[in-house]
Image (spheres, rainbow, N blue to C red):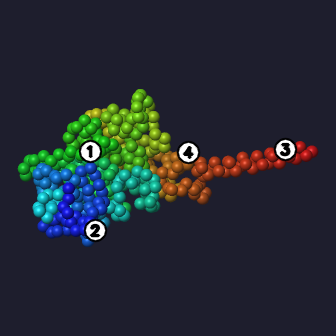
């Protein structure tokens, strides 16, 4: 649902001021679309497809009176951590249509999911796209989640698509209109009705409400993905599965290769969980083991934050290949070992060996093939000589 505008545009009112929205949306979802504002690149307007109810209007109106996260940030280089509503969007006749917020998009910000693939990491973050950078992003994500929980805000629809990250590793939450909170004045509860199955705890999949504990589950999944360069902890197919299993199925059945690898056919190319430092791996196994079915057993955002903080100062730097950094618990670079084993470099688009360093498996294979070819040619020449004699 939207208000008509000029040729190809959509007219809405923000705080009584008419603005024209581009007819082409930046983001389309099942319930709403986000449109840029003509002449103002700093804001966007989210318009609901169906007429929103009075409860949603009350939610947004209440959010406009709140100052979440203590008016952070204080660092001028950091954008706000929440894409919080800035004004209600209404039709020229006064009907509630949606809300305005700051714009977060490329090239300054990209979705967190972009950090889960090598090509996107290198394209968007260049030389900064190493494991140490991912560890810093993980710390920022845990920090922001802990701050939100401290202020009685529940993310609810917590996923890699609803979080964006900038080139400094700072994160910002989008779709704040779905955040769950209780109005401190009226006591009205505003729940989160949305969730993303790949990050939804079993109780959320079963229809339960969004809670801090369900946020803790989604946070654990996201942190594990960041620290393994994109691997989902519930990937793979259980050995006893009679049909193709999905991540959602594995979450519901509490089957994670991080905890019980013997139960799962692990996808080829999966990074070994041991790349996580012991303290972080222990938290992951708590979250995906007992914490899968017992929300009280899950590590909190504060626990993750403390464990991540301990690891940041001890990151090692590989002296063989650029952008290879890793945890201090490992005796050698796991990413170089992976290159030598598979020919695939998680952090570099090219796997050419560094001068003076042992060559990757792909390069060694090339030398071996050349040597065999030379030997074959010499053998043929020797046979020709022997026959001639």
Q: Is 337 on the left-hand or right-hand side of 147?
A: right
Q: Dot 1 corresponds to which residue?
A: 195
Q: Dot 2 corresponds to which residue?
A: 41
C-alpha separation, residue under disc 3 versus residue under disc 1? 72 Å
Quarter of the image that includes the N terminus: bottom left
Q: Dot 3 corresponds to which residue?
A: 383
Element type at mark 3: helix
Q: Dot 4 corresponds to which residue?
A: 341
x, y percentage for residue 183? 11, 50
C-alpha separation, residue under disc 4 versus residue under disc 1? 38 Å
Whether residue 43 appears in this view of the structure is no
Q: Marks 3 and 4: which is nearer the front?
A: 3
Cβ atoms at labels 2 and 4 below 8 Å apart: no
Element type at mark 4: helix
Q: Marks 4 and 1: which is nearer the front?
A: 1
Element type at mark 2: strand
Cβ atoms at labels 2 and 1 below 8 Å apart: no
Q: Residue at x 44, y 45 (%)?
A: 275
The disc, 3 or 4, on the residue closer to the chain's N-terminal end is 4
Compared to residue 184, the image places residue 255 above or below, namely above
């Amino acid at each position: 649902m939207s208000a008509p505008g000029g040729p190809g545009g959509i007219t809405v009112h923000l705080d009584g001021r008419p603005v024209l929205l581009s007819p082409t949306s930046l983001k389309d979802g099942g319930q709403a679309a986000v449109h840029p504002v003509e002449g103002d690149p700093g804001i966007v307007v989210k318009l609901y497809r169906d007429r929103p109810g009075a409860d949603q209007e009350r939610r947004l109106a209440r959010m406009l009176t709140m100052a979440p996260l203590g008016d952070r940030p204080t660092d001028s280089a950091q954008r706000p951590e929440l894409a919080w509503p800035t004004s209600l969007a209404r039709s020229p006749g006064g009907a509630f249509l949606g809300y305005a917020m700051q714009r977060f998009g490329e090239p300054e910000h990209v979705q967190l999911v972009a950090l889960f693939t090598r090509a996107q990491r290198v394209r968007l973050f260049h030389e900064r796209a190493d494991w140490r950078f991912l560890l810093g992003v993980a710390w920022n994500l845990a920090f922001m989640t802990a701050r939100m929980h401290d202020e009685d805000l529940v993310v609810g629809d917590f996923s890699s698509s609803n979080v964006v990250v900038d080139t400094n590793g700072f994160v910002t939450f989008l779709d704040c209109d779905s955040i769950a909170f209780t109005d401190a004045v009226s006591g009205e509860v505003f729940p989160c009705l949305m969730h993303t199955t790949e990050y939804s705890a079993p109780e959320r999949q079963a229809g339960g409400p969004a809670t801090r504990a369900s946020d803790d589950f989604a946070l654990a999944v996201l942190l594990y993905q960041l620290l393994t360069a994109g691997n989902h902890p519930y990937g793979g197919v259980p050995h006893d599965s009679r049909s193709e299993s999905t991540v959602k199925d594995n979450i519901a059945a509490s089957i994670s290769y991080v905890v019980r690898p013997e139960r799962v056919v692990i996808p080829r190319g999966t990074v070994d969980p041991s790349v996580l430092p012991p303290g972080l791996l222990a938290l992951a196994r708590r979250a995906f083991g007992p914490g899968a079915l017992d929300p009280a057993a899950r590590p909190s955002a504060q626990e993750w934050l403390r464990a991540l903080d301990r690891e940041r100062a001890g990151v090692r730097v590989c002296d063989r290949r650029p952008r290879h950094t890793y945890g201090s618990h490992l005796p050698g670079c796991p990413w170089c070992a992976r290159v030598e084993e598979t020919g695939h470099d998680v952090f570099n688009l090219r796997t050419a060996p560094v001068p003076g360093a042992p060559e990757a498996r792909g390069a060694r294979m090339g030398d071996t093939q050349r040597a065999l070819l030379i030997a074959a040619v010499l053998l043929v020449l020797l046979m020709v000589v022997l026959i001639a004699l």
